[in-house]
Image (tube, grey):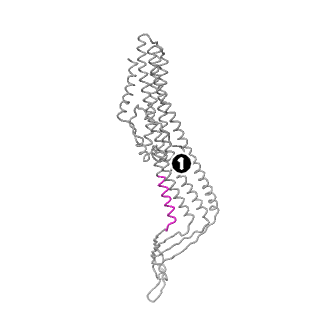
Amino acid sequence: MRKGFPLFLLTFGLIGPLRAGRAEALQPLDEFLARAPSHAFDTREAALLAQQREAEADVALGRLLPALSARGVYTRNQYEIATPTGPASRALIQPENQLDAIFALDVPIVDLPNYYRHRATRALARAASEQSEASQLDVNRAVCRAYYQHLGAAGLLRSAVQSTDTAQSNLKNVSVRRGAGVATELDLERARANVERSKQDVADAQLLVNLSARSLETLSGVTPTPAVATDIPGDDLAEERPLAEWLGRASETPQERALREATAAAAEQNKSANTTLVPTLSGAAQERITNATGFLGKNSTYALSLTLGWRLDYVGLKNSDAQSVARELARVREERAKRGTKDAIFEAHQRVTAGIAKSRAARAQAVAAGRASELASDRYSAGAATQLDVTQAQRDAFLADAGRVQADADLMFARASLRLAAGLHPKGSAEGKGR
């Protein structure tokens, strides 16, 4: 009784969730993907960075727009200065309490360096927007990985529970045979050791379930329904569309678009640096209202001006060289990213192809190993096999079923990775629709 009681508790504690799982299954993947962009730290950071870049582009635009300023000045002069201009009039040169109001309008007319800087910041803003989408794809990939890990862990837990049930049944059978004198003490201890080993498998599987659930919640903000020992949904093992169709989408991914905009920004920065020797032209208008009218006798006067500026310095020349190198560096990064995107698509497509073959073989192996376990148990009951054969067959059956679960989970994640690498929804296709 002492040895059977903990085993009963273990079985009851695992079978209970297994039955509950039929009433409440894990939420669909789309629910986690829908919540991830507003919760994941990476997507939130990328979205805020895009807003910052947009604001910086507006700041750069402001340098090209007219600027209006107003200034009011009060001056307390020690002496009033005035001069007679007639029998009953005088010109106030400096009043004791002087008031001045100055309104100025500055208009950039020709300013090529700032013009190209503005174009560069606009390109950077577009790059940040595209990078925000790329970040969302990265988060979706992490969510898919955690989701399928969670499904795989739940499937592994189911296999471990079934293995425990099988080991427990075998222990009962050996105990009966031992009582009848047709089984040895060695057989009984081997059966008992097999049960304890299966308990460890259950504990390991439960750990994977808990850790993957936590990761999924961290990434998406959605709490998975309590994990149950349930089988993983089977993949249909259908082949993907040809690799060439997937590679054709490589240039349309958000990451590629972001890098193209970054390269464009570097080119505009280079133009800005190259035009520092071009003179700038600006206009200004000023209106001054004062009670110090002087000999003019007018309280309000205006002035218009044009300013042509030119500057030659060593810093500007060297900055041009630096920006030229930065432009070439951006091009190299763009080329590297293009190759990286195609490599990611290629790898994911190959993993799907290999995963289909592996999953198909793993399913056949699981069926054969399960049948072998049953045969070993039957042969042991008939006295034609040893308990070592039974425990080994049961262990093989568990490992084969665990391999099947892992193969199916890996295949489903490989399919999702292929779509995400091509810039699509995890359930899309090379044509933007289902497989």
Tag 1: amino acid: Gly
Above or below residue 125? Residue 426 is: above
Q: Residues within 10 Å of mark 1 (few under 14, many from 20)?
A: few
Q: Which residue is mark 1?
A: 248
Principal SS element in the magenta part?
helix
Q: Of all residues shown, which one is farthest toward the left?
A: 23
Task: Give the residue drawn at x 50%, y 63%.
Answer: 61
Looking at the rendering, the stretch of residues picked out in magenta corresponds to 48-66
Q: For the N terminus, which image quadrant?
A: top left
Above or below residue 396? Residue 410 is: below
Viewer-side residue, 320 vs 25: 25
Q: Of all residues shown, which one is farthest toward the top?
A: 181
Residue 196 figure quarter: top left
Task: Give the residue drawn at x 62%, y 55%.
Answer: 325
On whether residue 55 falls in the magenta region, the answer is yes
Q: Residue 118 in the image: state x and y as whole percent.
A: 53, 61
On whether residue 192 falls in the magenta region, the answer is no
Q: Residue 341 in the image: state x and y as whole percent.
A: 55, 46
Above or below residue 39? Residue 211 is: above
Q: Residue 176 in the image: state x and y as whole percent.
A: 40, 14
Viewer-side residue, 417 vs 35: 417
Task: Give the residue drawn at x 40%, y 34%.
Answer: 227
Secondary element at tag 1: loop
Q: Residue 356 in the image: state x and y as whole percent.
A: 50, 36
Q: Of all residues shown, which one is farthest toward the bottom?
A: 87
Task: Give the residue drawn at x 55%, y 61%.
Answer: 117
Lateral position of residue 160 relative to residue 19, left or right: right
How many numbered marks, from 0 up?
A: 1
Viewer-side residue, 142 vs 166: 166
